[in-house]
């Protein structure tokens, strides 16, 4: 019996890489909260991890990000919103613009803290220390 020739294994296709001149944007998956990249012009994105379909905001919509105060998940929201509810822990987070906040170092662990202008103190989410916000700190941050 003559030997049977073996067919070569087919080579797998190369992974998709978009052309260099194609613009991409990003959003957070509505299912698993992973960061998704998508080509500009797409209307929705299917997550490769959890298969959730996330709608893409209309073109020209400015997005902002914040970290949830309840579970520390990165949240993405439309700029200008006053509050954002976390889809993981349902905490309602206050969304402040950059000109409405100031920064101070925690009086205990030195973690950089962000607070709303006018606040008299801020509680550190790392060590729970309450740092008083003095007039000198606010004046320094307003100049920065």
Image (cartoon, rainbow, N blue to C red):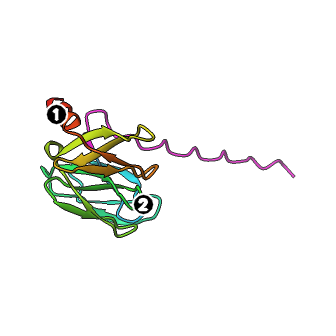
> Viewer-proximal residue, 68 or 17?
68
> Can residue 144 be found in the magenta stretch?
no
- Label 2 Cα crowd, 10 Å radius (few <14 / some 14-19 / many 20+): few
The region drawn magenta spans 1-24
Q: For numbered disc 1, what is the local secondary structure?
A: helix
Which disc is residue 101 wearing?
A: none
Quarter where residue 16 is shown: top left
Quarter where residue 104 is shown: top left
Q: Where is residue 47 in the image (x, y as percent from the top left)?
A: 40, 59
Q: Residue furthest right?
A: 1
> What whole-number distance in Å separates the C-alpha atoms at marks 1 and 2?
31 Å
Which disc is residue 139 wearing?
A: 1
Q: Where is residue 3 in the image (x, y as percent from the top left)?
A: 82, 47
Who's the residue at 38% across and 51% down the image? 35
Q: Name the residue under label 2.
A: 71
> Viewer-proximal residue, 32 or 95?
95
């Amino acid at each position: 019996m003559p030997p049977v020739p073996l067919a070569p294994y087919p080579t797998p296709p190369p992974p998709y890489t978009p052309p260099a001149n194609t613009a991409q944007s990003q959003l957070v998956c509505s299912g698993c909260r992973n960061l998704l990249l998508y080509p500009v012009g797409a209307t929705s994105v299917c997550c490769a991890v959890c298969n959730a379909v996330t709608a893409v905001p209309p073109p020209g919509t400015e997005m902002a990000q914040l970290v949830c105060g309840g579970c520390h998940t990165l949240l993405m929201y439309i700029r200008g919103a006053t509050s954002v509810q976390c889809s993981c822990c349902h905490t309602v987070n206050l969304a402040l613009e950059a000109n409405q906040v100031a920064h101070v170092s925690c009086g205990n662990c030195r973690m950089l803290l962000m607070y709303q202008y006018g606040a008299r103190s801020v509680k550190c989410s790392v060590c729970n220390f309450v740092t008083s916000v003095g007039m000198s700190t606010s004046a320094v941050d307003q100049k920065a």
